[in-house]
Image: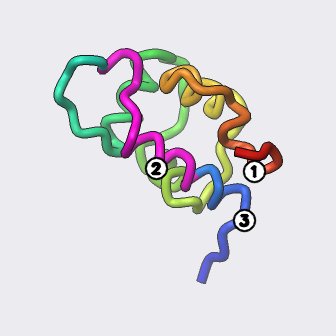
Amino acid sequence: MLVSHPANVFFAKQLRALMESSEPRILRGQRTRLNPNTLWGLLCDANPSLSRSPTQFYRYCNGEASPKLPLVNDVAALFEVSPHYFSNNVPT
């Protein structure tokens, strides 16, 4: 059984909260259900140099993998939040 690092779990929790309650800037006004696959497509459109697979992105969403800082920055920019939103060292 794989035990996830607490930072990965926190990132996944924050990401899921954004996906459920926020609308990325490029989707405003559209009726689109935001799931990990849709979000991954939006991130790839915004940054074609992303080299991770959709499967890897699901791992981030489930707290099974640790995202690199550039991806955290891309996600934060998409939702117009600070990258610190994903850090459990900053009080919310």
- The spot of residue 60 in percent (x, y) is 55, 51
Q: How many numbered circles are shown?
A: 3
Quick check: is 90 in the magenta stretch? no
Question: Residue at label 3?
Answer: 5
* Segment tinted magenta in the rendering: 12-27
Name the one closer to the observer, 57 or 75.
Answer: 75
Residue at numbered disc 1: 88
Is residue 70 placed above or below 16 in the rendered structure? above
Q: CA distance from mark 3 to mark 1?
A: 12 Å
Query: Height in image: 44 above or below 65?
Result: above
At 47% from the left and 48% from the top, the residue drawn is 17
| Secondary element at tag 1 | loop
Tell me the residue at 55%/30% (across/down). 75
Please state if 12 lies on the left or on the right of 34 as rendered: right
| Circle 1: residue type | Asn
Question: In the rendered structure, which amino acid carries the disc numbered 2?
Answer: Arg
Q: Quadrant of residue 32?
A: top left
Q: Earlier in the sequence, mark 1 or mark 2?
A: 2
Where does the image place residue 5, in percent across and percent down from the top left?
72, 65
Q: Main secondary structure of the magenta part?
A: helix
Query: What residue is pinned by disc 2?
Result: 16
Q: Percent x, y for residue 25? A: 40, 17
Q: CA distance from mark 3 to mark 2?
A: 17 Å
Query: Helix or strand or loop: what does disc 3 sit on?
Result: loop
Q: Are marks 3 and 2 in contact (CB under 8 Å)?
A: no
Q: Which mark is residue 48?
A: none
Q: Is residue 23 magenta?
A: yes
Q: Nearer the viewer, residue 26 or 21?
A: 21
Q: Residue at x 45, y 26 (%)?
A: 43
Identify the residue shown where x is 49% and y is 52%: 61
